Amino acid sequence: MAAATLVSAWGPLRPGVPGLCRCRPPRGLWAHAWRLPEPAGSGRSVTAVSGPGVSGTDRYCLELLRKRDYEGYLCSLLFPAESRNSAFALRAFNVELAQVKDSVSEKTIGLMRMQFWKKTVDDVYCDRPPHQPVAIELWKAVKRYNLTKRWLMKIIDEREKNLDDKAYRNIQELENYAENTQSSLLYLTLEILGIKDLHADHAASHIGKAQGIVTCLRATPYHGSRRRVFLPMDICMLHGVSQEDFLRKSQDKNVRDVVYDMASQAHLHLKHARSFHKNVPVKAFPAFLQTVALEDYLKKIQQVDFDIFHPSLQQKNTLLPLSLYIQSWRKRY
């Protein structure tokens, strides 16, 4: 997909991006937002977040998210109290699956772990969860909200197919992977919020695809350090870029054009998701708070002229907790 065809989807792409939030929240909101928990290593206890009655399995999921999916952890904190633990369980389940690929040395071992999770999901729906913290919390969520088993199995199946170290053949293949993983996770999240709405499902589909594309971009420097490149081959070929260019951390214009095309596609999905804003039930908005982090990354990569290896892209946004809280208060995504 050529860069030129995507300009209209994003508009002007160079500096001058407006800020995320322009209105000042009510008195006292700033202080409240800054009390959101800090990243792992800050020394703060999760009991302050989850309450005195938290179980060991709750705490395990909380810590797993704080270390492996901090953005998802912050988003889940802003869920209604009654569904918060279930949101943690879903995201912890996703993290367990996502880290299989990078934690095994052989594909066979990865397949065995995926088989464990397939059996775990089957056992969860038979009220026989194994003594594994995430499995137990997932069982509680399934019992409470009658979650659709198909979405859980689809996430496992797609992650299993992705154990091969192969680049995506085209952007559509990456989007299909994102739909079956990130979007499926959002469909489940909508279920724990009690949302059954076609417009919300459409928004979830586009947000999941945007999440998949942004995740692929963000992980490129890490994968490159392990001599792996997963960026869609069709876009690389369109701009005459090889995998070696990314391994050498090239800053050539053609390399940045590849990144631009992908970032533009992610931005387009966010734009489509927001086109349903007026028709999506307000109760669904907590499920879509991750758009704040996605927008933040896309703005930062635009500001460095799509240099995917720029050091600023590897730095955490310390204002993210505040931005998430404000967006939650504004009932926006």
Image (spheres, rainbow, N blue to C red):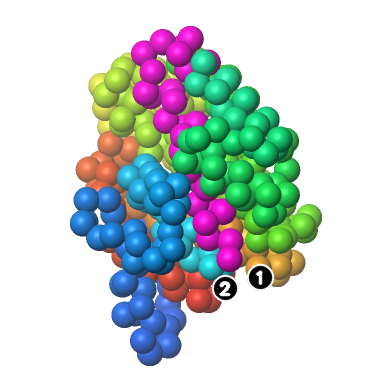
Label 1 sits on residue: 282
Contact between marks 1 and 2 (CB within 8 A): the answer is: yes
Task: Mark yes or no: residue 78 visible.
Answer: yes
Residue range in magenta is 82-111
Q: Residue at x 48, y 36 (%)?
A: 132
- When asked about the image quadrant of residue 247, the answer is top left
- When asked about the image quadrant of residue 159, the answer is top right
Q: Amino acid at mark 2?
A: Lys
Q: Quadrant of the N terminus?
A: top right
Judge left or right: residue 123 versus residue 74: right
Magenta: main secondary structure: helix
Q: Position of residue 115 (x, y in %)?
A: 58, 20
Judge left or right: residue 240 versus residue 319: right
Tell me if residue 333 comes above or below residue 178 in the rendering: below
For the residues labelled 1 and 2, the Cα–Cα distance comes to 7 Å
User: Does dot 1 land on a helix, a strand or a loop?
Assistant: helix
Q: Earlier in the sequence, mark 1 or mark 2?
A: 1
